[in-house]
Amino acid sequence: MKKYLYTFLLCFLSFQFSDAQIQEEKIDSTVIAQIRDEGMNRSQVMEILSYLTDVYGPRLSGSLGYMEAAQWARAKLESMGLQNAHLEAWGPWGRGWTLKNYSANVIGRQNFPLISYPKAWSPKVNKLTANLIYLDAKTDSAIETFKGKLKGKFVLLNEQREIIPPFEPFAARRADSNLLRLANSDGQRRGGRRFEMTPEMKQRALMNFQKMKLCLTEGAAGILTISQGDGGNVFVGAASHPQHPDSPWTSGRRIYDAKADDVIPQISVNAEHYNRLVRMIQKGEKPKLQLDLEVVFNKADSGYNIIAEIPGTDLQDEIVMIGGHFDSWHGGTGATDNTTGCSVAMEAMRILKTLDIKPRRTIRIGLWDAEEHGYLGSRGYISKHFVERGDQTSNQSEKIVYKPEGEKFSVYFNDDNGAGKFRGIYLQGNEACRPIFRVWLKRFHDLGASTITPLSTGGTDHQAFDQVGLPGFQFIQDELDYGTRTHHATMDLYDRVPAEDLKQAAIIMAAFAYNAAMRDEKIPRKPQPQASLNTRQP
């Protein structure tokens, strides 16, 4: 009985302590109301989004298009009245790549345009018509039979994939049950180790490695791979070198390095069209592919982040940051990945500057380069400004030592999970922030944002901060059709973005930045991790 009584009292006192913290956390209701009014009734977020997507288009790291869009964003931030708006080099890159012209047509009994898209850093192809061949091999001995048959041909590398009619909607908002599970989580993820290969997966990866290597050594004209997804959409990323499944991802030069190994042209093909080509060849047809691929490579010694700020007053040396990644893939215009995040952060800064707030801490925006390649831009910025020493050359852990800027850093808030509105925030295991964020979110329950989960989420730039003990957070968002239709796809376009969702997100981003900048204390930190700050990751 005493044991149960003790447990009850402990829970009661913890609850009371949380309530006390809530009462102590003060916010300026008048300013929050002004932020909501400005963001809802005079928003510019969709105009920013349209310029970055419709006018400037995709922003592949290192490309000429990235630099043009970055210069526009810098000028736009400056025109808002922000200070110190500049492009800041974060570290070495190599070469950029720009698609200038592309067409692909199947020639045979029937002629038709192939729904497809070239992979980034593929070399040019000058109006070539060549036979298509299906490299249908599942064993080493089967691969041997294709030796001497691939030179000058376009090679279908993958097996067919069954297309199942979609009976579930492509787009969805987070259900209340999902948000409740997040809120009630104990912070521990369940399941096996991430990215662990089954024997079947490893065998398939080994076969793909051997197939790609054969295509390269035999002098194939190009490689065609089946796109994930279906329904006419094409998901496309970077071309790749043959990669043995047992080799570490850090081995060899990356595709964008100035002296990267040669690759042959690589094309991502819509699943239905890819399957059709395989079936045609299996039935004895001999289709050809007519391909024209014009690309431009450019030297890019460094990558660049876009930085601007609203200076603080009495605590101006302490920094609050907001942002998202600026780079995108090239199939669409990077609308939901991640022009939405950049537009939300830019609009949040516009709102705060328009209201002429005088934050105690400096509020700084960071639009990051090369997130798609391992958060390189944000990692480079952190290394330059916030971290004095960390292990940069191996996987061994080393205690992080902060620079003076790092000691005075308060918090970073990130937006990069598609176009959906904010539903709450991931704590990244930082329970000390729960009572703070609970008060902040209370003002936005009517806009659908109320969930706080102890869980961590990854895959974007807040993780670069969190991994070195700097408070970094990502908002919980409605997924909409991010995973099914837009993420790294040719359909990642302006029209997939609901305006009201972006308005809501920008308001909450602005409010969180303002509240963090006005507190008496910086945002609490987790115990310092024994972590590595690797600025070059795959």
Image (cartoon, rainbow, N blue to C red):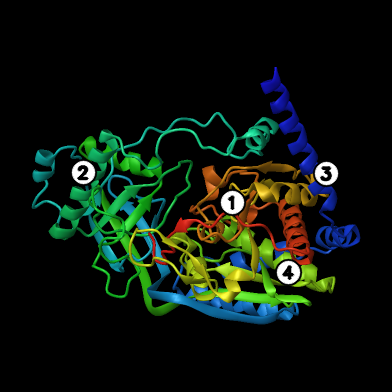
* Number of the label disc, if any, that sits on residue 417: 1
Mark 3: few, some, or many residues within 10 Å (few <14, many ≥20)? few
> Closer to the N terminus: mark 3 or mark 1?
1
As measured in the structure, the alpha-carbon distance from the residue carrying label 1 to the one carrying label 4 is 20 Å
As measured in the structure, the alpha-carbon distance from the residue carrying label 4 to the one carrying label 3 is 23 Å
Answer whether labels 4 and 3 touch (C-beta < 8 Å).
no
As measured in the structure, the alpha-carbon distance from the residue carrying label 3 to the one carrying label 1 is 21 Å
As measured in the structure, the alpha-carbon distance from the residue carrying label 2 to the one carrying label 3 is 53 Å
Mark 2, residue position? 207
Q: In this view, does 103 lie above or below 11?
A: below
* Amino acid at the residue labelled 3: Asp
Mark 4, residue position? 349
* Number of the label disc, if any, that sits on residue 446: 3
Q: In this view, does 524 lie above or below 448?
A: below
Q: Quadrant of residue 79?
A: bottom right
Quadrant containing the N terminus in the rendered view: top right
> Closer to the N terminus: mark 2 or mark 1?
2
